[in-house]
Image (cartoon, rainbow, N blue to C red):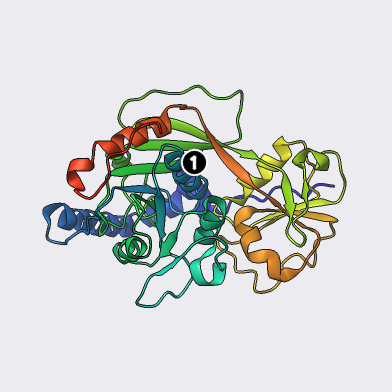
Amino acid sequence: MSQPRSSPSLLARQWQHGGWLSTLLLPLSALTAWAVSRKRAAYLSGAKPSYRAPVPVVVVGNVYVGGTGKTPMVIATVEGLRARGYTPGVVSRGYGVKIGPDARVGTGALEAARFGDEPALIARATGAPVSVHPKRALAAQALLKAHPGVDVIVSDDGLQHLALARDIEIVVQDARGVGNGRLLPAGPLREPASRLQDVDVVVTNIGTADGRPAHTGNGRPRQVRMWLEPGDTRQIETGATRPLSAYAGQPRIAAAAGIGNPERFFTTLRAAGITLEATLPLPDHHDYAESPFKALAADTVLVTSKDAIKCAALHDARLWEVPVQAAFSDPGLFDWLAQALRNTAGMHPTFRDKPVNS
């Protein structure tokens, strides 16, 4: 029997639809609005300086707190730019990791405990150099020093980190949109919903393709729909692979996810015809210091790539990673981005002029 789907918490429901608790918290949201406005004005006026890198910077972020699908978008952006002749590097905060005064830079198989789960996943998936530090400007400087061939920086998150100047802003949202439209804590927004009108691209993560949704236009902000296409599963213990379709109709399958919206992962699996006898939603960035899977009566446990990057030490042969790849309603998205970056050459004297398609 399939485990019932978990109901959203009271606060999550209020963040989406409003209600008494959200209204009660409105005075605190007014303080958030004041702080956000003051911070933004300080950077726009130059009262607080922003570091402008010698190469263009693309920020992928969100206004809705928590997970909306930024990591697949970052990976797709890196791969899309590389296919068009660029040499991207990535900067990230390194959430949950104590970095110290100096940024950490690495490539390839990075330790999640030293770099953070999302940076480690991005490095593994793309092969691009990754630099982590809470101060993105320091991360960018360290990245360019260690990898001088990098000619565009993609910032994983950091829309609100205005100390790093940016040339392109991409916001990723999901089906929740802006929720009740209120700022934290009365609502889920880090910035006012009007901020979406200032960015270059709004990507709406619809989770799974439903008839391959049509492209919705090239205005500003450019509106794009994204969905996640699962690939072949990989056994974390051995590296063996198996088609996702092999699990359809099979008994004793469970799924676990320590991401911002675990239900989206479970929905993806159900859409592939998999019956989940148990689901285990875990906190975002769960550390897996101890196995949470011991009580699961399942022969197979499907997990996200973000979880898999931290699960190797558990030595549980039941664990299989389900990688996903972002797909988009806008086939010209990365051609547009490549051209937009070329248009910033005057702001970056050391930036090499790149062809749109090479």
User: Residue 51's x, y, as percent?
Assistant: 22, 59
Check the picture and name the quadrant holding the C terminus.
top left
Question: What residue sits right under mark 1 in the picture?
Answer: 176
Which residue occupies 52% across, 50% down? Answer: 126
User: Residue 270's x, y, as percent?
Assistant: 72, 39
Residue type, numbered disc 1: Arg
- Which of the pair 81/222 is nearer the observer? 81
Above or below, 12 relative to 113: above
Which residue occupies 42% across, 27% down? Answer: 332
- Which of the pair 289/241 is nearer the observer? 241
**Can residue 180 be seen?**
no
Q: Secondary structure at mark 1?
A: loop
Q: Is residue 335 left or right of residue 206?
A: left
Q: Is residue 26 left or right of residue 322?
A: left
Find the residue positioned furthest to the bottom. Answer: 100
Which residue occupies 29% across, 62% down? Answer: 137
User: Residue 237's x, y, as percent?
Assistant: 76, 62
Q: How many marks?
A: 1
User: Residue 7's x, y, as percent?
Assistant: 64, 49
Q: Is residue 17 left or right of residue 277?
A: left
Above or below, 283 relative to 68: below
Q: Residues within 10 Å of mark 1 (few under 14, many from 20)?
A: some
**Can residue 40 be seen?**
yes
